[in-house]
Amino acid sequence: MNHLELFDFTPKELERYRRQIMLPGFGESGQRHLKNSTAIVSGVGGLGGTVALYLAVAGIGKLILVRGGDLRLDDMNRQILMTDDWVGKPRVFKAKETLSKINPDVEIEAIADYITAENVDSIVQRADIALSCAYSFTERDLLNAACVLWDKPMVEAAMDGMDAYLTTIVPGETPCLSCIFPEKPPEWDKRGFGVVGAVPGSLACLAALEAIKLITGVGKPLLGQLLTMDLNRLEFAKRRPYHDPDCPVCSEKAKQGKKQAIELLTTEEKKLLNV
């Protein structure tokens, strides 16, 4: 990714990642790219928690976990980083604890908050890639806009019941989330969202793999393609979404307008907005 310095591996790391280093085209070079990279995971639940798990075991250098709210008992059918004794406590801290025990070589920052207009720019600027797994479409749109503004790739993954979709967004190359979904769907009822844990788990594995492919250069990511999944029938399809040249988020005019607005802010205003 963007960090060019190369770190030496400890004998423990070489043994831990030996099986993936063996893959054709991956090697120590791919592993170094992972170790030099920072990934944001928004929404550390059944989807985001599993994404974070597979990035951690693959050897990502740093994870920034962003999720507000406490763990509920009805989260436990899918949130594999959680334990029963943690119900009622901020889930993001338990996610950090579990991941640190699984792979202590990964640096993990836990932010017990949701993605907001006030924090998104500062968070995105500290990362190389983002994985959009938040419950709220508002959070997803904010993350998408910040990734476009600061030229950071984003893996977008979402599911509803037994249906799921996945795409990889690279600013300047692919449609952004606003191009793909110009009309925003209604927010889900937080207590009426039916889910079998294996559905977000399956999608999360694919999302983590997309991030690993993008970071290491191995394989072919879903650039400019939307993978839709009907997991009831195990039917998969790839679609090519429209790249809107006048998109209010990713068009050149929109990006320049926001950058100019940021430049006009005072130093104190930039501090308040974390930009």
Image (cartoon, rainbow, N blue to C red):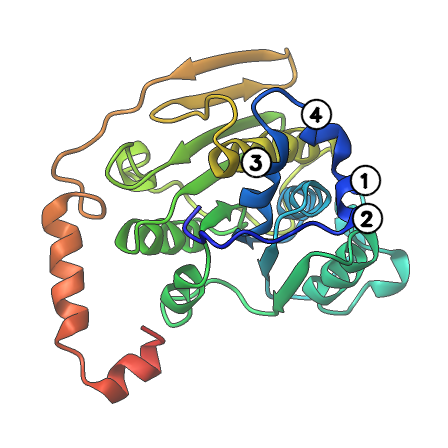
Q: Nearer the viewer, residue 209 or 239?
A: 209
Provide the residue designation for mark 4. Answer: 22
Residue positioned 44% across, 55% down in the render: 139
Residue positioned 75% across, 52% down in the render: 10
Looking at the image, do the residues carrying marks 2 and 1 touch, with CB atoms under 8 Å apart? yes
Q: Secondary structure at mark 4?
A: loop
Residue positioned 23% across, 86% down in the render: 267
| Dot 4 amino acid type | Met
Instruction: Tell me the tag on residue 30.
Output: 3
Q: Earlier in the sequence, mark 4 or mark 1?
A: 1
In this picture, is 129 found above or below 219? below
Provide the residue designation for mark 1. Answer: 15
| Dot 3 amino acid type | Gly
Number of marks drawn: 4
Q: CA distance from mark 4 to mark 3?
A: 11 Å
Q: Earlier in the sequence, mark 4 or mark 3?
A: 4
Looking at the image, do the residues carrying marks 4 and 3 touch, with CB atoms under 8 Å apart? no
Image coordinates for residue 62, horizontal then vertical, percent: 60, 57
Provide the residue designation for mark 2. Answer: 12
Q: Earlier in the sequence, mark 3 or mark 1?
A: 1
| Dot 1 amino acid type | Glu
